[in-house]
Amino acid sequence: MEIPKKMLAAQLVARGQIELREVDVPVPGPGEVLIRVEACGICGTDVEIRDHGMPGEPAMPFTMGHEYAGVVVQLGPTVDEFKIGDRVASEVHKGCGRCHNCIMGEYTACLNFGKPEKGHSASGMTTDGGFAEYAIKHVNTLYKISDQISFDEAAIITTAGSAFYAIDAMGGYIAGDTVAIVGPGPIGLALAQASKALGADKVILTGTRQGRLELGKKMGADYTVNVKEGQDPVAVVRDLTGGLGADVVFDAAGTSDSLDTALNLVRPGGAIVMVAFYKKPVTVNINRAVVRNVHLYTVRGEGRRNVRRALSLSAQNKIDLKPLITHHFPLREINRAFDTFTQRIDNAIKVIVHPQE
Ligand SMILES: [Zn+2]
Ligand SMILES: [Zn+2]
């Protein structure tokens, strides 16, 4: 496979400013491969990085993009896990492999986050990512995918991986449970689908946008609650659970209101998993958890190899992320792609960039 010396990359050149630049095609080091990027999704975290930055960020300019899939085109030294031509999905976080958390398997919470000299990388966040024609990935962040999974779906597989990680982090088990999800964003919708695939008894999705809630119904929600239309999620869940509350509640919205709702939806002794980043400090009545022995969990990203589970369920047609994909753009229209995503033009949910177009 012929690999050019130069490529096009969408780089963050200043806060809030992404530009297309011609840069060198990177060369994979030990344990790494070069990927021809076929699809790279835009996520809320990208907007955060563009506009506000994140801890561990490299010096600008650097290439953003952390949700991508493609084809292995070059192997670095020692790589025998993949071969040239393999179609692969990727996850973001490569732990350092030497800190306490990495050794315990919690590599998305690597204690050397943002320290490449220690072996950590999070592509598109702390090193160059996938809004480019080619990108470097360490083998421990890659998964070979079957032919029936499209690159678009593979690019956003971490969305489902994050959902499975959230379930994993609380100790697993959704079979037979009543699950409430606050916030019908991509992760909330993926959680509805994952919960149903794992045998949830009832899935209740609450939010404010009717279109998203409709989509939620297609993706596994048995009941939807539109707060904006005056529906009360607490009353609905009580009604459905004989007054008890949900066994599990996911806060996929990340506000004071959403966490407060979660605290009122969960049954005594149930679990709340916080899967969204909170944009501001939140104020809630945390005694709703303490005095009722509610278990609180947080997760970051798609840890503990849960992307593997997402890919498997996708190949088995038990989950399907395609309904989340609403828009495609070639790499040279990166800023239009971002605008479409941030302004939710035409009800955009997941916007995918195609670097080879
Ligand atoms: Zn993301
Ligand atoms: Zn580590």
Image: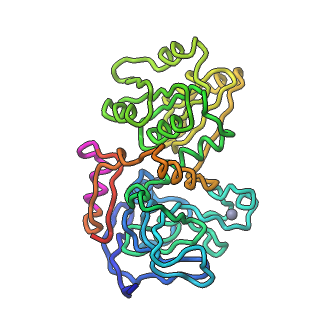
Question: Percent from the top left, x then y, of residue 179?
Answer: 55, 29
Q: What's the magenta bit mostly, secondary-structure-wise?
A: helix
Q: Is residue 45 magenta?
A: no
Give the tally of numbered discs. Answer: 0
User: Which residues, given as a range, are shown in magenta?
Assistant: 335-347
Instruction: Identify whether 310 is placed above or below 283.
Output: below
Residue drawn at 37 percent across, 67 percent down: 38
> Is 354 placed above or below 21 here?
above
- The answer to whether residue 350 is left or right of residue 194 is left
Q: Position of residue 44 (x, y in %)?
A: 42, 50
Tell me what residue is drawn at x 66 percent, y 39 percent.
172
> Left or right of 303: which side holds 54?
left
- Magenta span has 343? yes
x%, y% of residue 206? 44, 28
Q: Quadrant of the N terminus?
A: bottom left
Classify residue 207 by image quadrant. top left
